[in-house]
Amino acid sequence: MMNFDIGQVLACFMVLFAVIDIIGSIPLILEIKKSAGTISALKASLVSLVIMIVFLFVGEKLIIFIGASTASFAVAGSFVLLFLALEMILGIKIFKADEQIHKTASIVPLAFPIIAGAGSMTTILSLRAEYASLNITIAILMNIILVYVVLKLTGRIEKLLGDVGIAILQKFFGIILLAIAVKLFGTHAPAIFE
């Protein structure tokens, strides 16, 4: 594999790990699990993997095809993150759970937009400009394995933290999610109005 570079793989892994932030998403995952009753770690992980790999190879063409830009895609994603953050911080419901949530929760909103969301996708497009596709693919796969492990262990994590621990984590990571939403908006919004 002549394009393989362990340094590139590790660099891509760390960037994607920070953006996906599966550890920071634990309170949100627990909230989704509470609403849906159950989530499938395997389904969420596989759907996220497919979305990210497809986006790695056809994302830019797809965005251009639908007449959007990477910036508008990122700004749209920042709004979704903003509303998720407000739910976590204020304890309000913005996303209404319908009767189908128990069937779809592993895919929407867990796989998309929480794991494979606008932040992940814009990051993948940025990485593609700097690194070989093979190395990015391996980094995505490594992150998805980690995502699967965390999703499988959410029940144990919930017991370990207890209600108070989860509430504290939820508020704390809600603020972090809000900061990411603001940063994503601030970085990409000017490009829309140029």
Image: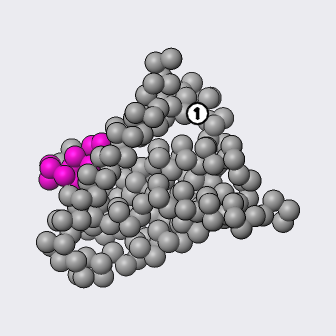
Query: In the displayed structure, would residue 192 be above or below residue 85?
Result: above
Q: List the single residue furthest toward the top.
A: 194
Residue found 55% across the figure and 62% down from its top: 14
In magenta segment, residue 83:
yes
Q: Position of residue 150 (x, y in %)?
A: 41, 73
Query: In the displayed structure, would residue 65 be above or below residue 142?
Result: above
Q: Position of residue 125 (x, y in %)?
A: 61, 43
Relative side of 154 to 71, left or right: left
Q: Position of residue 64 (x, y in %)?
A: 62, 29
Relative side of 30 to 184, left or right: left
Residue type highlighted by circle 1? Ile
Is 166 in front, or is 108?
166
State whether residue 175 appears in this view.
yes
Residue found 21% across the figure and 69% down from its top: 166
Query: In the displayed structure, would residue 39 be above or below residue 133?
Result: below
Residue segment shown in magenta:
80-92
Quadrant, the N terminus? bottom right
Which residue position holds label 1? 63
Query: In the displayed structure, would residue 119 be above or below residue 11?
Result: above
Is 89 in front, or is 33?
89
Majority secondary structure of magenta residues: helix
